[in-house]
Every structure is written in C-alpha cells, then in structure tokens.
Amino acid sequence: MTASKPTQTTQTTQTFVLVPGAWLGDWSWYPVARQLTERGYPTLALSMPGLTYDGSPAGLRLADAVDHVVSEVESRDLTDVVLVCHSWGGYPVTGAAHRLAGRVAKVIYFAAVVPEQGTPMIDENEQYAAMMRQAIAATPDGTVPVGLDAVQGVLMPGDPAPLQKLVSQLLLPQPGGYMTDSLDVPPVTKIGLDAAYVQCADDIALARPSAEFAARLGVEPAVIPGNHMALLTDPAIVADALISALESRR
C-alpha cells in the first residue's frame, strides 16, 4: 500500500463562510469544508432559514437569509472573512457583504448568480419565471419544490444515478420569497470589495452564462471541470479553486 501524500496546511486568520444554493443546506458544502479545514483554513458552512427541518419556510423573505448570514458572522465576531456563495447563494452573500464590508476580505462566487440591483432571482431567466411563480402559488407554504428530474437533467447530469437520487432526497423546497425578492444594492466590487468568480465548465444550471455574471463584477472567471454540483463530486478541485481565488487579486 502506498502512503498518501500529506495535506499541505496553511496558518491563516481568514475564515471561509460557505453559503449554499437554492434547495440546499450546509451539508452541500461539507466535502469542500473538510478540504479547506485540513489545509488550515477555518471554515463555517451555513444553512439558510427554512432550509432545515427545524423551521417552517412559510413567509420567509430574502431579507431573512441576508440577516442570517450577517448574524452568523457578527455573533462569532469573525473578521477577515471570505464569503463564498453557490448558485442562488449569491443573493444573501451579496446583501450580507454590503453590511459586513469591514469584516470581509473577499467575496467568491462559485457557480453562482451575481445579482443585478433590483432584479430578483426569478427574473434572471424569463423562460422559467412564469413556471416558478405558478409553482409558488400552487404550494400552501409558498415554496418552490424540486424533483429528481431536475437533479438528473440540470444540476448533476452525467453523475452516477445513486448519487443523483441521494441528492434529490436531501433537497428541501425553496422559500418563494427568496426567489421573488431583489436586492437594492450594486455588485460588491462597486463598493471596493475584492471579488472573484469560479465557473464550472459543464454547468448548465445557471440562469445565464457564468461569463455574464463574472462581468457584473468586472472579473474574468476561473474555470474548473465539473457540473453545477462539483462541490459534492470534486471537492478537492473546488477547494483548490477557492484558495487560488482568495490568493489572487483583481
């Protein structure tokens, strides 16, 4: 048996705060969090309100998710924070970054939406806007459900069927207000925060091409292999990309 190569660690005061995408919880970041922690980076993965089994998603608004990120950082008195978002998580992270600017070292968008001021997530793709609004109206708690077909065809195409099934069973309905509310703030780079964008080469889940979202920040995306859920399937590659993005400057 060949001994595994020891993981290189770094001593740092910077803390990665990982925010998941729609339908996901903190668990979606655990494989990457382990990689970052083993390399010496303090890491905190968050679940947004309504996306756990200990609370109702009914009536939640985007402001609740923003408040949650801010509260988690401030209650721990974290400074030199690296805010990382996946997919829809670009919304609460962008809102939180404006309020936490003095504590933020960098904002990294990983396969994420970079919100445009005044535009809700639901309106980033006109093709699905009406369908999503109908789904919200049809549910008693005003949520957006998601099924195995979306995991297989959009989120994780080509991945092993057992893994696709497992992930679909872990997803929870997304609070509708998270999708219909917008942010009244510009991209984080407009207030002088450092930012980066990491794109997955085979990602077909985003409402717009990653290059368009990166352009809103005024940056070029770093491209890594994988689909929208590479944080689960290729966590070492994702961790490498986050560390590289942290160390690079715009």
Image (cartoon, rainbow, N blue to C red):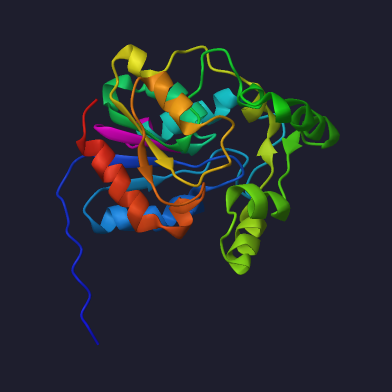
Q: Position of residue 120 (x, y in %)?
A: 61, 21
User: Who is closer to the viewer here, 88 or 38?
Assistant: 88
| Residue at the image point whose x is 70% and y is 55% from the top | 148
Relative image position of residue 206 (x, y in whole percent): 56, 36
Quadrant of the rendered image containing residue 105: top left
Which residue reaches farthest left? Answer: 11
Could you tell me residue 19's position as x and y percent? Answer: 45, 39
Quadrant housing the C terminus: top left
Name which quarter of the figure residue 17 lies in: top left
Observer able to see residue 78: no
Visible residue check, residue 186: yes
Horizontal arrangement in the rendering, residue 73 relative to residue 232 (left or right): left
Query: Does residue 224 lie above or below 206 as drawn?
Result: below
**Residue extent of the magenta highlight:** 74-85
- The residue shown at (85%, 34%) is 138
In the rendered image, residue 75 lying in the magenta stretch gets the answer: yes
Report the quarter where the N terminus lies.
Answer: bottom left
Give the x, y percent position of residue 49: 58, 38
Number of numbered discs overlaid on the protein picture = 0
Q: Residue at x 28, y 54 (%)?
A: 37
**Residue 66 shown in magenta:** no
Q: Residue furthest bottom?
A: 1
